[in-house]
Amino acid sequence: GPVAETFRAIQGAMTEEYVRSTQGVFQFELSGEGGGTWYIDLKTKGGSVGFGKPPVTADVVMSMSSADFVKMFT
């Protein structure tokens, strides 16, 4: 779905430099189609994205609809 596609695009755009400069873990609590708990880890070497809780404690937790999440990142 659109949420998973957006996370795949974010993963593809990640660089080690971006991870090094950001140093943050973002957790998204998304409602609606494709929702659930997702994360972007820009703290751990190489960075990662995924479904579920992040591997380390989130620095920021955002709650929004899955439609708003997709709009925010596209």
Image (cartoon, rainbow, N blue to C red):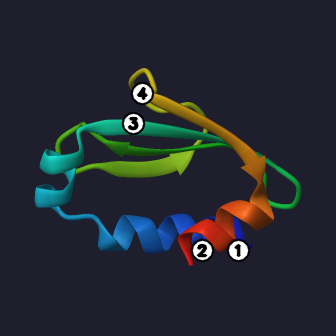
Q: From this viewpoint, is residue 73 visible?
A: yes
In the rendered view, tell whether residue 1 sits above or below residue 52.
Answer: below
Q: Is residue 48 left or right of residue 33?
A: left
Q: Is residue 6 left or right of residue 22?
A: right
Q: Residue at x 42, y 27 (%)?
A: 59
The numbered disc on residue 25 is 3
Front position among marks 1 and 3? 3
Q: Earlier in the sequence, mark 1 or mark 3?
A: 1
Q: CA distance from mark 4 to mark 1?
A: 25 Å
Three-letter amino acid code at the position of disc 3 = Val
Q: Earlier in the sequence, mark 4 or mark 3?
A: 3
**Circle 4 is placed at which residue position?**
59
Q: CA distance from mark 2 to mark 1?
A: 5 Å
Q: CA distance from mark 1 to mark 3?
A: 21 Å
Q: CA distance from mark 4 to mark 2?
A: 23 Å
**Circle 2 is placed at which residue position?**
5
Three-letter amino acid code at the position of disc 2 = Glu
Q: Residue at x 67, y 73 (%)?
A: 71
Three-letter amino acid code at the position of disc 1 = Pro
Q: Earlier in the sequence, mark 2 or mark 3?
A: 2
Q: CA distance from mark 4 to mark 3?
A: 5 Å
Front position among marks 4 and 1? 4
Q: Earlier in the sequence, mark 4 or mark 1?
A: 1
Few, some or many residues within 10 Å of mark 4 (<14, 14–19, 20+):
few
Residue in front for this viewpoint, 36 or 66:
66
